[in-house]
Image (cartoon, grey):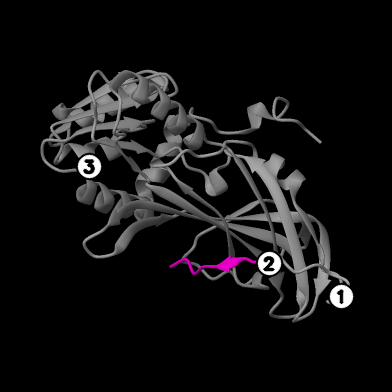
Amino acid sequence: MLNEREIESCYLGQFIPVHYHHNMLMDQNRMNAFQGAIAHAVRPGMKVLELGGGTGVLSFFAAQQADKVYCVEFNPDLVQEARRFLAQNPNGHKVEVIHADAFDYLPPEPVDVVICEMIHVAMLREKQVAVIEAFKQRYLERFGGPLPIFMPEAVVMAVQPLQQDYNFHGYYAPIVQFQDTAVAYPGTVELAQPAVYSVLDFAEPVDSLIAWRGSFTVQQDGTLNALRFVTKNVLSIVQEQGTTIDWLNHYMTLPLARALDVVAGDLVEVSFQYRAGGSIPSLQAAIRTGLAFDEVEAPAPVAVRTVEFA
């Protein structure tokens, strides 16, 4: 089993290539959610900081109302592109694009909102948690409290057992898959409802270790050979309406090392742990699944919550 140091080169981190950002700009789900959340959270007169600004589009959204936006980007190619793009857009002059590492940067003045979208499914690969926690410590040491509002404000993560078809034109390849949340895939069978395994509230201290042990009651016969990981980002809380503005990442489906034949009513136990920002293989290596003992012999199952992700 690889350790984190050996698989360090496998995760995305902060350095996303320029050409990949086209996919993010074309992602209507992501763009609509952030545009709406930023329009709600950012008010005239505010100061905004974006950590990991990429092409500058989220800073552009903020600049439509904020007085000043600091946009921090580590990739020098993207720094150049963001400056070029912002110069061609309304209120782009309000955005200062800064070539710096988000792990180290502090703005020259207190800010009201911090936008940080270093988010991968299950909070893997990218460094959202580490960047935000390091920022909180530096910010409080420099400016004291209160902390600014963070966007996203929270992240809700769930897991769901699946039967997944890994036959590709006769070629069997159990591979990690990312699936659009709005598409029904005929090769995907949901064996039970998803269960929430972690809620991260960025207004509070966030532990990078994410660990869970829970159980599912199987709802139909099948073969449990994959787990789906669901990540809902609560971008902004609309308190006056009692609602939230959310962004749901693509589903991530991980094949299991060992498949389980299950029937409706079976109790399946699942456990795993990983570090936020760690690699996908580090999570895969930690997953354990198995059928529970008979009711007489088994301890009480771990209580889980179920959640619907719209």
Q: Is residue 261 above or below residue 12?
A: below
Task: Say few, some or many: other residues with alpha carbon within 10 Å of mark 1 (under 14 / 14 to 19 / 20 or more).
Answer: few
Task: Say few, some or many: other residues with alpha carbon within 10 Å of mark 3 (under 14 / 14 to 19 / 20 or more).
Answer: many
Residue 271 is marked as none
Residue 298 at x, y percent in the picture: 84, 69
Q: Is residue 232 above or below residue 120?
A: below
Camera-side residue of 121 and 202 = 202
User: Quadrant location of residue 22?
Assistant: top left
Q: How many marks?
A: 3
Residue 294 is marked as 1
Callout 3–callout 2 Cβ contact below 8 Å: no
Real-space Cα separation, disc 1 to disc 2, in angstroms? 23 Å
Real-space Cα separation, disc 3 to disc 2, in angstroms? 38 Å
The residue drawn where x is 25% and y is 18% is 108
- Circle 3: residue type: Phe
Residue 131 at x, y percent in the picture: 46, 30
The residue drawn where x is 62% and y is 36% is 278
Q: Quarter of the image containing the C terminus?
A: bottom left
Q: Is residue 77 above or below residue 195?
A: above
Q: Is residue 68 left or right of residue 266?
A: left
Task: Say few, some or many: other residues with alpha carbon within 10 Å of mark 2 (under 14 / 14 to 19 / 20 or more).
Answer: many
> Which residue bears the numbered disc 3?
61
> Which residue bears the numbered disc 2?
162
The span picked out in magenta is 303-310
